[in-house]
Amino acid sequence: MSDKQEKILYIATHANDDPEKAHLPFVLGNAALAMDIKATVVLQSNGVYLARKGFVDHMVSGGGFPPIKKLMADFVELGGEIKVCKPCIAERNIDENDLIEGAETTAGGAVNIAAIEADAVFVF
């Protein structure tokens, strides 16, 4: 048996434009973390809005899931990583200082490496 920790990468491309798809990476990510699987959510495209301070405070829940604010807080508390596409936030005039605690910017090369290293990649 291998000692290598399993890894799942979730790429999230939606926010309030599709609340159900926005919730899914964090629902599944929390489940992965509970199973001792390393989980990373990469926010790209409109998904980067989820990392803007205050954005999810009043976002409609999708798919019958708990509020995304809670899902995201639980995700970070359980050790999940939130990566935010730097070019995507620049395109949307979001400053890095406006990102939630626990979110860190990333770019294409790092995302490609994370995908190569992951045991599974899901895109929402």
Image (spheres, rainbow, N blue to C red):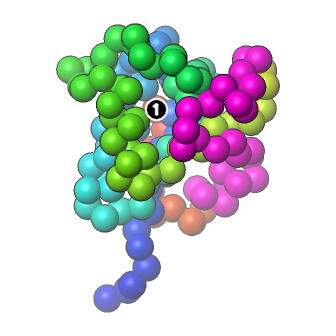
Left or right of 29, for residue 101: right
The residue sitting at 42% across, 55% down in the picture is 79
Q: Residue at point 33% right, 42% down?
A: 74
Q: Is residue 122 visible?
A: yes
Where is residue 58 shown, x and y percent of the image? 40, 11
* The N terminus lies in quadrant: bottom left
Residue 121 appears in the picture as rendered: no
Mark 1: amino acid: Phe
Count numbered badges in the picture: 1
**Of the pair 37 and 96, the residue shown nearer to us:** 96
Asked which quadrant contains residue 87, the reply is: top right
User: Dot 1: few (<14), some (14–19), or many (≥20) neighbours within 10 Å?
Assistant: some
Position of residue 46 measured from the top left corner of the image (x, y, whole percent): 60, 21
Q: Residue furthest left?
A: 64
Which span is picked out in magenta?
Answer: 92-115
Camera-side residue of 112 and 16: 16
Q: Is residue 98 found inside the magenta-colored segment of the image?
A: yes
Compared to residue 39, the image places residue 20 above or below, namely above
Determine whether 23 is above or below 10 in the image: above
**Residue at mark 1:** 124
Whether 17 is among the magenta residues is no
On screen, residue 47 above or below 30? above
Point 20% across, 20% down: residue: 64
Instruction: Kindly state the secondary structure of the residue where label 1 is placed.
Output: loop
Q: Is residue 18 above or below residue 44?
A: above
